[in-house]
Image (spheres, rainbow, N blue to C red):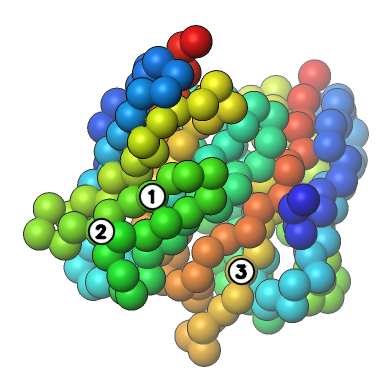
Amino acid sequence: AQSVTQLGSHVSVSEGALVLLRCNYSSSVPPYLFWYVQYPNQGLQLLLKYTSAATLVKGINGFEAEFKKSETSFHLTKPSAHMRDAAEYFCAVSVNKFYFGSGTKLNVKP
Amino acid sequence: DTEVTQTPKHLVMGMTNKKSLKCEQHMGHRAMYWYKQKAKKPPELMFVYSYEKLSINESVPSRFSPECPNSSLLNLHLHALQPEDSALYLCASSQTTSGGFNTGELFFGEGSRLTVL
């Protein structure tokens, strides 16, 4: 069975600080992995995706994620948070079907 | 700018009304999806269409009726809804594999915010 676990439903950082959002997956086959961002009252926007090429994936808005098979993780990072990064972030795995994590709300303090 | 367009953005309806949500994409994708999203929750899959045929129905009540008139359009017909059906309804599309399932990313619309009184 496939599943996605996002540790921490809420993460709060100061502007300029490192952002780290955690995602662990379970999959019986090599997965495709994604991070989406959702701003209030909007749809989901793709930040980045892992499709078995490079393990370090760079996305939009300065975000990146590293696929670690040994840890079954795909954590999302950004070196310096901006106020505009405040949003809900969803990790997802696709193995024939999309499975979303429960989401992490990122708050950025001035 | 999203390449998946949903209308209307907001809809308020009574429990006896009949209304429809519409979704359109022009990316040549052959898979289209309806998701329901409640506040502070991830999207929940409702229906999947692959090559204009319904391939997945996640045990959705019959008061929700999907329709795929062609490869670019997806409708969700609503009838006799309940207040608990109030949610953000998201349409998405993707390319399909030969098996009919998605391994690439989903492209989402902005959603239709539905309120059932």
Q: Which label belongs to residue A64?
A: 1
- Residue for point 77% across, 39% down: B112
Residue A90 in percent (x, y) is at: 44, 41
Q: Which label belongs to residue A67?
A: 2
The part of the image, by quadrant, that contains residue B115 is: top right
Task: Say yes or no: labels 3 and 1 on the same chain.
Answer: no
- Subunit of mark 2? A
Q: Amino acid at mark 3?
A: Ser
Closer-to-camera residue (B64/A54)? A54
Residue B15 in percent (x, y) is at: 81, 27
Task: Say yes or no: labels 2 and 3 on the same chain.
Answer: no
- Residue for point 34% across, 43% down: A76
What crowding class fits label 3: few (fewer than 14 Cα within 10 Å), some (14-19), or many (20 or more)?
many
Query: What residue is shown with label 3?
Result: B94
Q: Disc 2 or disc 1, which is closer to the eye?
A: 1
For the C terminus of chain B, the image quarter is top right
Q: Is residue A6 left or right of residue A86?
A: left
